[in-house]
Image (cartoon, rainbow, N blue to C red):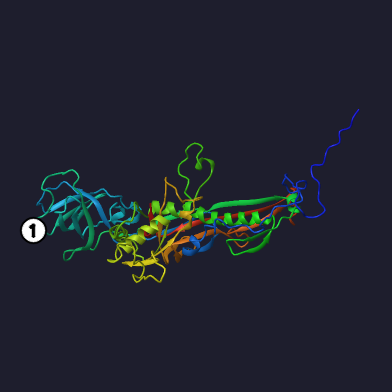
Amino acid sequence: MSLNIPGFALQPSATRVPTATNYMTSFDFLNQYLPDTYEKEFERYGNRTLSSFLRMVGAEMPSNSDLIKWAEQGRLHIKYTNVSTVVANGLGEAQFTVADTLIPADQIMAAAGTASEIAIRIGQTVMISGNAGYAGISNKGVVTNVGASTFTCSFYETGGYSGSGTLAVPGETVSVFIYGSEFKKGTNGMVGSLEPFDTILENNPIIIKDNYEVSGSDMAQIGWVEVSTEDGANGYLWYLKAEHETRMRFEDYLETAMVEAVKSAGAVANGAAAKGFLGSEGLFSAIETRGNIFTGAITNLGDFDSIIERLDKQGAIEENVLFLNRQTSFEIDDMLAAQNSYGNGGSSYGLFDNDEEMALNLGFSGFRRAYDFYKTDWKYLNDPTMRGGLVGGAIDGVLVPAGSTNVYDQVLGRNAKRPFLHVRYRASETEDRRYKSWITGSAGGAATSDADEMRVNFLSERALCTMGANNFVLFK
């Protein structure tokens, strides 16, 4: 019987001299030689946080209800753009039919308890103008009779109605607006009165949650990492580094949820509404429903002028901020640079006085064209892990009016000045749900359960109020 004695894989030397017999081919952390490691993280993605948009343009205020309601003013003057008649050319009187979306009957107080669906009353004077294709129609007259969706007008002009001259011409429509009134001597006053036509809007908060977990055993294995984080913190962290990143991610979600949220619509089988999820109206949804949408590239000043003409028809807010992705920001830079007759080659942007000794400025931070516009990049639209690079449903930017607006607050029961964009969060004297954070488990100082872990919980309940969405523009 023989005994096999294993040979030596390594023969250590007495001194630190590399020899053929003391070379280690197996390289792991149990060997004599350990790898060089960097204890500081390399920040290869720079600042990874996305939140900042709402902090720049909005505000936060508490709400103690699960429904937020407000009223926005309607137009002071009334104009109908889809009006037709069957009267022939040259007649002194014509009956017109209004096919526009009519003001609800309960918004108008008419005589003798009856309600007219159109906001035109007997004795008012109106301007009648032909729409596209019928530019020759132009009349002024006085209203002599009003029905549910019709009114009769007697024309001032000698030639009477200046329409097509035939009966019931298909597609012939006119626009009508009220510019005053006229009554004969000794007659009674105006019949009926108009009530303010307000738009009642509402939104509901949603509950946003997140958490971070670490077991008690992992907490006993301390590993230090030197960090410098996006919010300015720096130094050494151990297992709580992951908790810190969870917190930053949650804070981003507090903003992106307010931007992207949509309300549940309908009760389709297995849909969100059918399962009890209400959703909420976010910024993009509010603008798509009640605001303005610009589609396509901004290649010249005429493209931007079409946006300004639309703003003229709305609140005409003096100062506006453009939050854009990189491509749209470049498009506006190029559009502005083209206004300089010496800048066709892109060599004299900015103040148009660049020279060879200074860095060439090829961008603009603001400009004035009827209104003041300030331009900034929106990181959320550029980040490849969020909206950056999307094709379907892509959004290139948003125009946000600066300042505040007066609205009637249903909770306060009075007019209040509010920023166009602001967040309402649930809060009371005993519960503040703006930003809650608490620790559960049995590790890390917590003693709330028998779970061998530390669980850091995050919660917020909030909604975004987009007031005066008709002053916003969404770029697609």
Q: Going by the image, does 69 lie left or right of 428?
A: left
Amino acid type indicated by mark 1: Thr
Disc 1 crowd rating (10 Å Cα; few below 14, some 14-19, many 20+) is: few
> Whole-percent x and y of residue 239?
69, 55
Residue 447, x across and y down, in percent: 75, 54
Quadrant holding the N terminus: top right
Q: Looking at the image, is 378 positioned above or below residue 215?
A: below
Report the front residue among 75 and 153: 75
Horizontal arrangement in the rendering, residue 434 relative to residue 38 (left or right): left
Which of the 4 image quarters holds residue 192? bottom left
> Quarter-wise, where is residue 230 in the image?
bottom right
Asked whether residue 45 is in view, the answer is yes
Can you tell which quarter of the image residue 308 is in? bottom left
Query: Furthest residue to the right?
Result: 1
Residue depicted at x 50% and y 40%: 271
Residue at horizontal 25 percent and vertical 52 percent from the top: 81
Q: Which residue is mark 1?
A: 158
